[in-house]
Amino acid sequence: MHMDPELLAASPQGARLHLPPLEVVRRTLPNGLEIIVQEDHSAPVVSVQLWVQTGSIHEGTAMGAGISHMLEHMLFKGTATLSACEFAQKVQDQGGYINAYTSFDRTVYWIDIPAKGAEVALDLLTDAALHSTLPPEEFIKEQEVIRREFAMGNDDPDRVSSTALFANAYREHPYRYPIIGHLDVFNTVTRDDVMAYYKARYVPNNMFFVVTGDVDAAAVHRRLESLFASVPRAALPPVYLPEEPRQLGRRELHAEFPTELTRLHMAWHVPGTAHTDVPALDVLAMIVGHGRSARLYRSIREEKGLAHSVDAWCYAPAQGGLFGVDAISDPQQRVPIEAEVLRIFQEIEHSGVTDAELQKAKRQSLSTQLQAVTTMRGKASDLGSNWLLAHSLDFSRDYLRAVELVDDSAIRRVVARYLKDANLTIVSLNPAGAAHAPAAAIAVARAGEIQRFELSNGLRLLVREDARLPLVSVATAFQAGLLAETAENNGITRLLAKVMLKGTAKRTAEQISDEIESLGGGISTDAGNNSLSAFIRVLRPDLKAGLDILADVLCHASLPEKAIAREKEVQLAGIKAEDEEVTVVARTLLRSELLKDHPYGLRGSGTPESVARLTQDDLAAFRDRAISARNGVISVFGDVKAAEVRDLVEQVLGKLPAGERAFAKLPQPAPLAEAVTVERNRDKQQAILMVGFLGADIYSKDRAALDLIDEASSDLGSRFFLRIREQLGLAYFVGSSNMLGLVPGPFVFYLGTDPMKLTAVQAELMDEIRSLAKDGLTAAELARAKEKLLGQMEIRNQSNDSFAFAAALDELYGLGFDHYKKTRAEVEAVTLADIKRVANQYFLHQHPLTAIVRPKV
C-alpha cells in the first residue's frame, strides 16, 4: 500500500516516520479505458500491468467452469500478427518478463521490463487484450495443461483443504467455486465459450492499465490513446452476484487424504474491504497469528506443543470475506487446537489486548506494506488493487490511517461481533482413519405414528411423539372461514383471527405476547377458506404454560372494541392494497363471477362495506359458533408422551363448550351455463388473463389427477411456460392454481402479459388448454408432476409445525388424520388415462370463465 505523508507511524523509540507523497497521473479515454501512471525514475525499470475487471465470480451461467483462468492461459497464444512464441520472444528481446494471474474478481497481465521496452510492453498487452485469436490447436494444448494443473491441485493437501474451506464457508456467493473451476464442468467448456466470454468481458470500459517506473506519463497516455483509438466502449452484460446469507450455525467438514499430517482451517465470515471493521480485523490477525511472539504461535506451538505451524489471516475482498486460523499438526491434536484457538479469542473478547501488542501489530502492518512496494511491480500491483477494490488510488493511505486508529475496544468489538460459534466454519484434512474420533454409537430418535384421542367434550386430539428435538408444535383448527361467511359479514374470520390475540379476561395483548415469548415460543392465528386456526410453539418443559395461554385465547378472548377498531383499519387498508395489485383484482373477479352467490366467490379479506359494519357482537357470536369442541381438532406434535398430553389437554380444554359442527349442509356451486368473459380496467401497465373452470372438492376421486395437472402446468418446465413464455415471448409469467375445499373451487390458468399482446396470448392459452383437455399429459409430464407433488409433501411433513396443521385439517374435514398415507398411494395410482379423462371432463365439457384486467383503452 502507498503511504500517506500525513500518516506518522510510531517506531519503537517513539520517533515518527515521514513518507514521500504519492504522485500518480490518471486519465480516462472516451471509450472508458482508464490509465494510471506513476513515474518513478529511481531505477530504469517499468512494470506494465493490464487489469481486466473480471474473474471467476463473473462467469455467470458458466460458473465453476474456470473460463477466466482458461482465458488467462490463452491470451498470449496468438493474435492476428503474432504467434505464441513471438509474444515471449519480443518480451525477452527487451530483457523483460511476462506473466499473469487470475483471481475471484480480476485477471491481471503484467510485463516487467527495462525502461527502453515500455512501449513494446504496452503494444503487446494491448494486442493480446483486443486481438487474441485463441487458436484451436493451442486451446487443445492448454486444456491438457490445465487438466494437469487440476491433478497437481488434487495431489496437494494444502490446495485441497483450502478449496474445501471456501466450498463450505460459502453457500450462495460464487467464492465457493475454485478459481480454476471444477474439472467436470471445465471439461464441457469449448473454445467458442471462451471466445464469447473474451468478447463480452475484455472491453475498454472493463479494463485499466497501471504503469509504474521510469516512464513519461504523457507518452504512455499518447501511446495507449493511439492503440485504443478505434476500439469503442461496449455494453457490459450484468453479472448477478448473490449476497452470502448470514451463517446461522457452525459448519464442520473433516475429510481424509493421503497425508501424514492434519491441515486445520477455522474461519469466520467478515465484511468486505470497505467496511470500517476490517482494519481492526487485520490488526487482530497480526496480534494472534503473525510472528513468533503472536498469541497463537506462543501458546499452541511453543507452550503446548500442539501444532507444527499456526497462523491467522484476514481475507476481505469486496463482497465479504473470511477471518481464519490455519494449523498443521499431528491428527490427534486437532481437537485440542480448536479448543485452544477458541479459548484465546474468548480471552481477548473479555480481557482485550495490550498496548504493546497493538503497537507491534501496527508496525508489522506498516512494514509489510513498505516491503510490498519496494519494486515497480509491487507499486503497480498496489495501485491496481486500490483502484479495483475502492476506485480510489488513496485507499492504501486511508486504510493505514484507519489501522493506526485501532484500539483495544475495536479489537474486542470485532471478536464479539464476528468470531461467534454460529459464524464458524471448521475444515480439516486428515490421514486415513483420523477424520473422526471414535465415538459411542448414538441412538437416533425417530418420530412415532400419529395417535388419535377424543376428549370428554368431543374435541379430537392428535399426538405425534417425536423426541428428535425438545420442541413441541401445537395446531388447533375449527370449521369456519370463507365457507361460513355471507356477503353481509364477509371478512369476519380474518378479523376475528387478528382480534383473538388482543386480550382475554385475565391477559392483555401485551401479556399474551410477553408470556409466550419469554418461554422462547410463539403464538399465531390464521383464517382460511374453510377454517379458523391458532398455533403455538414451545420448548418441551413449557408445554403446560403454552397450552394455558392458548386455551385462554380460545375460550376467553375479550375482543376489545379498541382492538377491533384498529384491526378493521388495518384490514381495510389491506383491501385497498389488494385493489392495486392486478393479479389479485383478476383473481377476485374470476372467483366472484365463476362462483356467484356462493361463499367461495367472496374475498378472504372482505369488502370495505362488510368489514366496516362488523361489530363486537358479530365477532363474539361467530367465535362462539366456530370455537367449540365438536367443531375442532388439536394436534400436539413433538417431544411429548401421548398419555401425558391427553391428560394435559383435557385439563386445559376440557371445559370448551361441546357445540356442533359448523357445516351440517354445504352449499354447492353451480357450473356455468355458457362461456363468460368479464373485464376490469386498471391504470396499470400490464394485463392479466385468467381462465377458470369449476374444479373438484377434497373428497373427489378426481382430486389427485387435478392436483397432478396443476403441478404439471405450474412450473418453469410446463408446456404453458415453454410455449407461451419461452418460445413466443408473449407473457411475463404463466401457470395454474387449483383451489381445493369442502366444495368444488376454481381451477385457474393464468398469465401476465403486455396489453398489446393480449389477443394473441389469449388465443395461445386457449389452444394449450384445449390440447391439455383433449390429450392429457405426456408420460414425462406425469412422472415429473408425481415426483414434485410427493416430494413437496415429504418436505412439508418434515416440519412438525406444518405436519401438525395438515393432519388437523384432514381430521377436521373428515378425511382422517392419516390421509397423508393414502395420498401417496392415490397419486402414484393415477394413470395417463385418468389424467386424460379428468382433463376432458373439467376443461372440455365445462364452460370457462375468462377474467381480464387491463389498462383502459
Image (cartoon, rainbow, N blue to C red):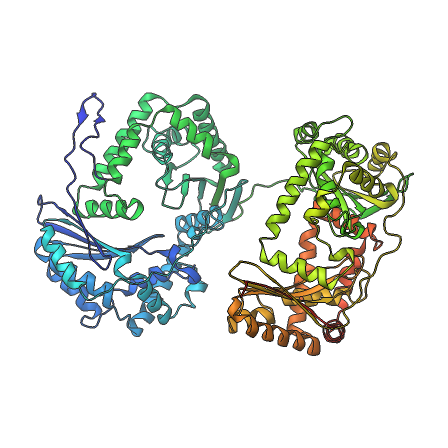
Residue 817 visible somewhere in the drawing: no
Q: Is residue 156 above or below residue 326?
A: below
> In the depicted view, which residue is nearer to us: 578 or 166?
578
Residue at image x 73%, y 64%? Answer: 594
Q: Position of residue 284 (x, y in %)?
A: 37, 31
- The quarter of the picture where the N terminus appears is top left
Instruction: Name the spot of residue 46 as percent of width and height, x first.
Output: 13, 51
Total numbered badges shown on the rendered structure: 0
Query: Foreground: 435 or 226?
Result: 226
| Residue name at image x 9 percent, y 43 percent | 42
Left or right for 202, reference 497:
left
- In the image, residue 172 sits, relative to residue 247, either above or below, namely below
Above or below, comparing residue 334 to residue 771 in the picture: above
Tell me the residue at 23%/40% (across/down).
394
Q: Return the residue nearer the eye: 800 or 709.
A: 709
Please say whether residue 220 is visible from this viewpoint.
Answer: yes
**Residue 236 % position (x, y):** 34, 60
**Residue 512 figure quarter:** top right
Q: Position of residue 9 (x, y in %)?
A: 22, 27
The answer to which quarter of the image holds residue 549 is: top right
Q: In percent of the image, x 36 and y 71: which residue is there?
A: 192
| Residue 713 appears left or right of 184 | right
Relative placement, left or right, of 6 versus 568 is left
